């Protein structure tokens, strides 16, 4: 995610920059190779009416030997088969027909599995039925899922969503924390270390009219679950397993949290709208030959978010085996949509060469009406760019936003880190990658201006305004507030990588970052772990990162 800028943009000729970007894309150097539904006895959300849905029939086949493709298409079949069978099906699809949905450079291992169906009515109401199977690493008596639709900033406008949960085909007690946007499911009996479980969640809620979203400086106020006559935004719209260190409540600054990489199969009915998701999109297998239903699949995605348009502009191109697409509503002219595609393509090509291949073969950039608190927002396979930045592409603020959000495909969609527990990791790396982008595409002078404006200048202005110094390497809830979080994480934290370049050289820094993606891709690293790995790679690199991230004293 990147915060908005109050700067008045300079509009650059789209046609001229397209020519420049296409030419430079060909010249980018490569350093690495590419390639009850719950029963009526379930505990309701306070104030909500629990849907009464009969238990599903047992499908045929079922159990551990069930056909993997059948289980991945149908929540009823998935639930009846059980956790172990569904987890095995996830491995099977990753190895088989869906292998092209993930890069073969990444190992096929057991991951959590989501199988779901959803409908989006009039682009303004969501009904979702999601089965999730997972295996716990340690004993636990509860499962915590992030449920952004339950956030109080949204539900104060629309009322709470209806939620029903069952575990292994039995109603499961649960509680919804609206302040923290969390769904906590009580596991009775509890799970032992290494044990698998399956939970089914049914959730229904309205999207908020865009003009009613209150920009409170946090994820719920960014417009991630809102609609207007042109576009509906579906960011973090489904219940999501939380990473262990990111299972706490959201705060009015920063991102929603972190989620384990998983195997996804989601069929979405969306009527006449065009649905664009962060997964690989295709026709629904149960609705062959008909429009209005999209099957979103992936084998290494931490989340599957989406946007729905009734009309607008679209451009696409394949680069390095990745289909890159750009979308915009009618209010965004066609040339900026095409230019956003070119800038995204250059980012994908550059970062693939520097940090390694993506683990998915589709990547979308979408112009949407985010609130003033966020100029962009990242999801695996999909980034949202605030539509009013599309008049400032071509080395201007909009280009910076696109570069930053594209970089998030590597940090933290590939190299996972806790948005709540270690926010400095992914945000500092996305900022550093943006500087590399500017240097490769627009030249050293433009990169220097970008660094001075968004990194050095931001940190300097904050200090001159009386900001009280804090270490960027700390959990989100330990920052004094959003006024400190932004300059420290996005500016001081990112300056660590540039200071490291001055010490050991750019190629060494890039080689180290690429090694993190190689060794910890699709997993998680903490800020402390990154510094420890840096010390092992080069003692000077580790000392620079430790100084900038953990020392409470100001840095140069």
Image: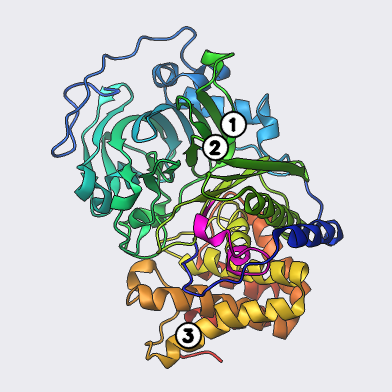
Q: Which residue is mark 2?
A: 276
Which comes before the other along the chain, label 1 or label 3?
1
As drawn, the label of residue 281 is 1
Q: Nearer the viewer, mark 1 or mark 3?
A: 1
Q: Is residue 229 left or right of residue 248?
A: right
Q: In front here: 293 or 190?
A: 293
Q: Is residue 514 visible?
A: yes
Q: Is residue 404 left or right of residue 464?
A: right
Q: Which residue is mark 3?
A: 551
Q: Is residue 261 left or right of residue 540?
A: left
Q: Which residues are magenta?
A: 384-400
Q: Nearer the viewer, mark 3 or mark 2?
A: 2
x, y percentage for residue 85? 49, 22
Would you call the spot at circle 2 few (<14 residues within 10 Å), some (14-19), or many (20 or more)? many
x, y percentage for residue 134? 44, 36
Q: Quadrant of residue 172?
A: top left
Q: Quadrant of residue 298?
A: top right
Q: Considering only vertical position in the picture, is 189 above or below 531?
A: above
Labels 2 and 1 touching (C-beta < 8 A)? yes
Residue at the location (49% across, 46% down)? Answer: 260
């Amino acid at each position: 995610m990147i915060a908005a800028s109050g700067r008045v943009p300079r509009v650059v000729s789209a046609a001229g920059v397209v020519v420049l970007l296409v030419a430079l894309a060909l010249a980018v150097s490569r350093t690495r190779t590419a390639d009850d539904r719950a029963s009526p006895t379930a505990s309701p959300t306070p104030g909500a009416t629990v849907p009464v849905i009969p238990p599903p029939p047992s499908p045929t086949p079922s159990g551990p030997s069930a056909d993997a493709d059948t289980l991945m298409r149908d929540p009823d079949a998935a639930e009846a088969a059980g956790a172990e069978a569904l987890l095995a099906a996830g491995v099977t699809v990753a190895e088989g027909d869906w292998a092209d949905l993930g890069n073969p450079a990444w190992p096929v291992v057991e991951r959590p599995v989501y199988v779901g169906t959803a409908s989006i009515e009039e682009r303004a109401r969501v009904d979702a039925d999601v089965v999730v199977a997972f295996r716990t690493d340690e004993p636990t008596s509860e499962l915590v899922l992030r449920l952004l639709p339950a956030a109080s900033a949204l539900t104060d406008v629309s009322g709470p969503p209806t939620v029903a949960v069952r575990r292994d085909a039995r109603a499961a007690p649960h509680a919804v924390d609206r302040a923290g946007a969390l769904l906590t499911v009580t596991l009775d009996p509890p799970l032992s270390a290494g044990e698998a479980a399956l939970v089914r969640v049914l959730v229904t809620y309205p999207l908020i009219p865009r003009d009613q979203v209150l920009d409170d400086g946090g994820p719920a106020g960014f417009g991630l679950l809102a609609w207007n006559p042109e576009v509906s935004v579906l960011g973090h719209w489904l219940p999501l397993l939380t990473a262990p260190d990111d299972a706490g409540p959201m705060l009015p600054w920063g991102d929603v949290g972190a989620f384990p990489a998983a195997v996804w199969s989601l069929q979405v009915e969306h009527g006449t709208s065009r649905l664009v998701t962060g997964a690989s999109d295709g026709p629904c297998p149960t609705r062959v030959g008909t429009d209005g239903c999209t099957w979103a699949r992936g084998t290494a995605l931490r989340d599957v978010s989406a946007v729905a348009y009734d009309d607008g502009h679209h451009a696409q191109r394949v680069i390095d085996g990745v289909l890159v697409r750009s979308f915009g509503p009618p209010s965004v002219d066609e040339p900026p949509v095409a230019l956003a595609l070119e800038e995204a393509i250059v980012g994908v090509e550059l970062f693939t060469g520097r940090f390694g291949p993506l683990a998915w073969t589709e990547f979308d950039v979408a112009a949407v009406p985010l609130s003033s608190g966020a100029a962009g927002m990242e999801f695996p396979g999909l980034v949202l760019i605030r539509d009013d930045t599309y008049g400032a592409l071509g080395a201007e603020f909009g280009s910076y936003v696109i570069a930053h959000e594209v970089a998030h495909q590597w940090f933290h969609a590939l190299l996972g880190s806790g948005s709540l527990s270690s926010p400095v990791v992914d945000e500092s790396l996305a900022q550093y990658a943006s500087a590399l982008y500017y240097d490769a595409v627009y030249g050293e002078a433009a990169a220097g201006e970008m660094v001075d404006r968004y990194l050095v200048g931001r940190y300097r202005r904050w200090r001159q305004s009386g900001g009280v110094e804090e270490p960027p390497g700390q959990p989100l809830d330990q920052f004094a507030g959003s006024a400190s979080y932004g300059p420290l994480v996005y500016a001081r934290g990112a300056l660590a990588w540039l200071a490291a370049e001055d010490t050991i050289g750019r190629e060494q820094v890039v080689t180290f970052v690429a090694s993190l993606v190689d060794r910890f891709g699709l997993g998680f690293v903490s800020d402390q772990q990154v510094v420890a790995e840096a010390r092992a790679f080069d003692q000077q690199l580790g000392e620079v990162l430790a100084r900038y991230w953990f020392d409470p004293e100001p840095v140069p």
